[in-house]
Image (cartoon, rainbow, N blue to C red):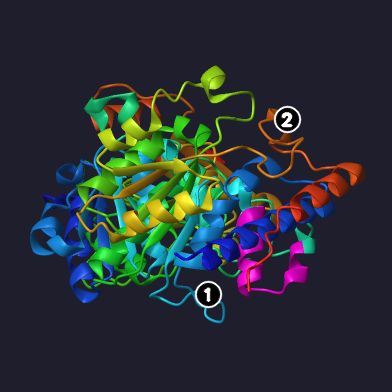
Amino acid sequence: METRKIATRDGFGEAIVEAGKKNPNVLVVDIDIGKSCKTAAFHKELPDQYLNVGIAEQNGAGVAAGLATCGKIPFVVTYAAFGSMRICEMIRQEICYPNLNVKIACSHGGLTPANDGASHQAIEDMGIMRTLPNMTVIMPADYYAAKALVKAAAEFEGPVYLRFTRDAIPVIYDENETFEIGKAKKLSDGDDVAIIANGDTVRLALEAAQQLREKGIGARVVDMHTIKPLDVNCVNTCIEQVGKIITVEDHNILNGLGSAVAEVIAEAGKGKLKRIGVQDQFGQSAPYERLLEMNGITVENIVAQAEKLLK
Amino acid sequence: MDRKELIQLKNKATELRIRIVDMIWKAQSGHPGGSLSVADFMTACYFKYMNVDPANPRWADRDRFVLSKGHVCPAQYAALAMKGFFPLEVLDTLRKEGSPLQGHPSMNKCPGIDISTGSLGQGLACAVGMALAGKMDKKDYRVFAAVGDGECNEGEIWEACGTAHKYKLDNLVVFVDWNNLQLDGTCEEIMPPVNLARKFEAFGFEVFECDGNDMAQLVEVMDKALASKNGLPKCIVGKTVKGKGVSYMENVCGWHGTAPNDAQYQQAMEELNALYIKEEA
């Protein structure tokens, strides 16, 4: 069966229009990559709620903070590499410290800006954002998850970092699926191994679980779309009921989803963990699937690691 | 402005300076030099121009003040206390554990602070955001921002200027506290400012220049800046003296972030108290 594929940045582009129509305080602050980040429809339909501050990310963050003090809900829209690292300290000082209602909405998360090369591949962003007090960090797993979580972020009071894929990725959810910020979604049952993933890697986890099932191994799949606040109850349930956990992410294995889950496991004092993710190395210009392969972010590796954990 | 009002404003500035030195002496920590150089602009804003309500610090229609050079917050804290945002005794808690008066301003701890600042270069963009919101909502509040000359080394200042110009923010007044001293030395030594007034002009501002420690001149240019509704954001480049009012601090780089000792405090109090002008009947 041919799977439908849509980039999650497209989900953002559609949902932000809906959010803006529902609440006129929702604004887009573009940094001259709006067309790429899918804000063109918002610009066209809601011109009075649209700003473009030029190629000036730092200023974009500050302007958004000032707008938020006046009751606006600005979405600063850029690429993940810039939205997390170029403006990290502005987000810390002017958005997270005063706990302002600003959203940083980033396309090109992880290795998905594949042929753009390492400069545009954000493999550190979620980890960096996760260490900022008051920040919420989200990566939706597909188009429908992106739409739902963008709308949830618009209604959530406080700073949120949202990360989307540049490339089209398979649709795994139904359009009526509901999502709650900070609440993980269990997508398949199984008590032999738990695969906790986020973003595009959720579909890899689902495929791996299918293959494991054919081998008689029950794999539980969890979509941890919010890595901060982490759904600690969900991780603890996995520890109690399954014990063996694999994390999968399109992010450096340092400080992202795998690290967040490892923190819970370490403090629980039980459970076994294998982290799959970018191997603390920069990417390069190459097809996205190849970049994932180079880092072992594949269905085959998830299956292999699951079998290894169960030995 | 009549002579009586001018004298009242000058005396307010003197009181502000006394409170600045007093709180930094009590804290034995803080930044007196820049607090004293910006004191006259701060006084003019809070005691002549700004429409604020101490009983309702987050009143939506208030004028905003952004202290982009956040380290000189003793000047703003003194103004807020004198205005009635919190009791004057609170000034004695500057930089102490649990105090609303953090070493750099925190909007969620201190009433009257419109945005947290302290990392240089960032406040002006926030002020631009506030002015933009005012234009979007068709409100007539104004946004006043104070930036340092050294702070203008930061690129984000100039990014923010671009946005202020693009969105025609004539409700924004930026005061450049040109005291010509940075932490490590003079502006010329550290990073020559070349010509701040022309720079702001080139970035699309309507620029006014004055002696930023001369209340009569300040009021004259502030009146002009606020009356000008031509779509251009306003910039006042105020030539100031770092440490103004305390002889041994004036133009001395070392007083950027040092607290006076007891003897120095006594001398400062004598010198500052001598600045009060007797009001005419």
Residue ID for mark 2: B254
Residue B225 picture quarter: bottom left
Residue B224 visible in the current orientation: yes
What chain does badge 2 belong to? B
Residue A289, numbered label: none
* Left or right, residue B124 beside residue A169: right
Q: Give the range drawn in magenta.
A: B74-91
Q: In this view, does A238 lie above or below A168?
A: below
Residue A140 location (% of width, % of height): 33, 56
Q: In this view, does A253 lie above or below B43?
A: above
Instruction: Give the dominant element type of the magenta stretch: helix, strand or loop.
Output: helix
* Left or right, residue A133 beside residue B254: left
Q: Which of marks 1 and 2 is in front?
A: 2
Which badge, 1 or 2, is on the more N-terminal residue? 1
Residue A3 location (% of width, % of height): 15, 51
Q: Is mark 1 on a helix, strand or loop?
A: loop
Question: Looking at the image, which is closer to me, A110 or A101?
Answer: A101
Residue A242 picture quarter: bottom right
Residue B277 location (% of width, % of height): 67, 59
Residue drawn at the location 60% of the way across and 72% of the way down: B83
- The 10 Å Cα crowd at callout 2, few under 14, some 14 to 19, many 20 or more, is some
Q: Residue extending furthest left?
A: A44
Q: Are marks 1 and 2 in contact (CB under 8 Å)?
A: no
Residue ID for mark 1: B57
Label 1 and label 2: CA atoms lie apart by 35 Å
Q: Residue extending furthest top?
A: B189
Q: Which amino acid does label 1 sit on?
A: Pro
Which corner quadrant holds the N terminus of chain B?
A: bottom left
- The 10 Å Cα crowd at callout 1, few under 14, some 14 to 19, many 20 or more, is some
